[in-house]
Amino acid sequence: AGMNICRLDFCPEEAESYIDVVRTIRQAVEKRSKKQVAILLDVREYEMRTGVFASGDSVSLRAGDFFKLVTDWTFQGDKECVAVSRADFPSLVHTGSVILAADGDLMLKVLQSARSSVLTQVVNDCELRSLQVCKIPGCRMEQTAQLDRDWDFGSLMDNWDFRSLIHEVDIVVVGFDLSSEDVQRFREMLGECGQRVQVFARIETQTGLRNFEAI
C-alpha cells in the first residue's frame, strides 16, 4: 500500500534544501504510474523552550517548589532555575500568570517578574526535560525571538526560499497563533499560481480558538 501523504516538518533555516527533497519525492512517484502521493508542509510557529540542565537531561520538580526562569540562554539549569529562549519573556507575564511546559504536563504560577528573570511556583509534580516547549495561555508571542533558529509569521513570509517551496507542495498546514488576517495574508502570498495549494490552519492556542469562526 505504501504512503499517500508525505509530511515535511518545516525548519526555516533549511528552506532551500526542502525544494530538493520535494523534487526527489516527485521523481520517485513518477516511477510508479498508479501511485499518487501528496506532499504536506507543516509550518509551526516559533516555540519558546527551556534550556538545558547541567546535571543531565531532566530535573524532578515538586508541587510547591520555587522555580526561576532566566533569559540568559547560556545558563546551565538545575532544579531551582532554567533558561528560556526569549529575551523578552519577563515582559510577557505578570504576577498570577500561568506558564505551561512539557506539553502542558507542568504548570508554573508566576510570583514575580524582573528584568531578566521570572520567579514561579510549581503547581504539580513533574519531570522537566531539557528543551521543552513553554506556553503562556492567552499570550500571542509576536516579538522577535532570542535565538537565530526561531522565527515569527512575518519573517517567514519574507523568506524567499519558503515562498518558492510552498508552490512545490500540495498542502500547507499553518500552525501559528493565527488570526483571520494571517490566513488571508498567507493566501494572498500564494498568488494565482498557488491557488491549487490547500491551506489548513492548526488551531492549538487560545488566540486561535477565539478566532476560530473568522479563520
Image (cartoon, rainbow, N blue to C red):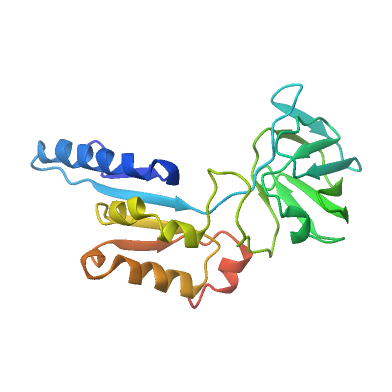
Above or below, 67 relative to 75: below
- Residue 3 seen in the current view: no
Name the quadrant containing residue 51: top right
Q: Residue at x 56, y 67 (%)?
A: 208
Furthest-top residue in view?
A: 55
Percent across and percent down for residue 206 are 63, 65
Q: Residue at x 28, y 54 (%)?
A: 164
Above or below, 30 relative to 211: above
Percent across and percent down for residue 98 are 78, 56
- Residue 194 seen in the current view: yes
Above or below, 28 relative to 196: above
Percent across and percent down for residue 8 are 36, 43
Percent across and percent down for residue 179 are 52, 71
In which quadrant is the N terminus drawn? top left
Q: Nearer the viewer, residue 187 or 58?
A: 187
18 left or right of 86 in image: left
Q: Residue at x 11, y 40 (%)?
A: 30
182 left or right of 109 in image: left
118 left or right of 8 in image: right
Furthest-bottom residue in view?
A: 214
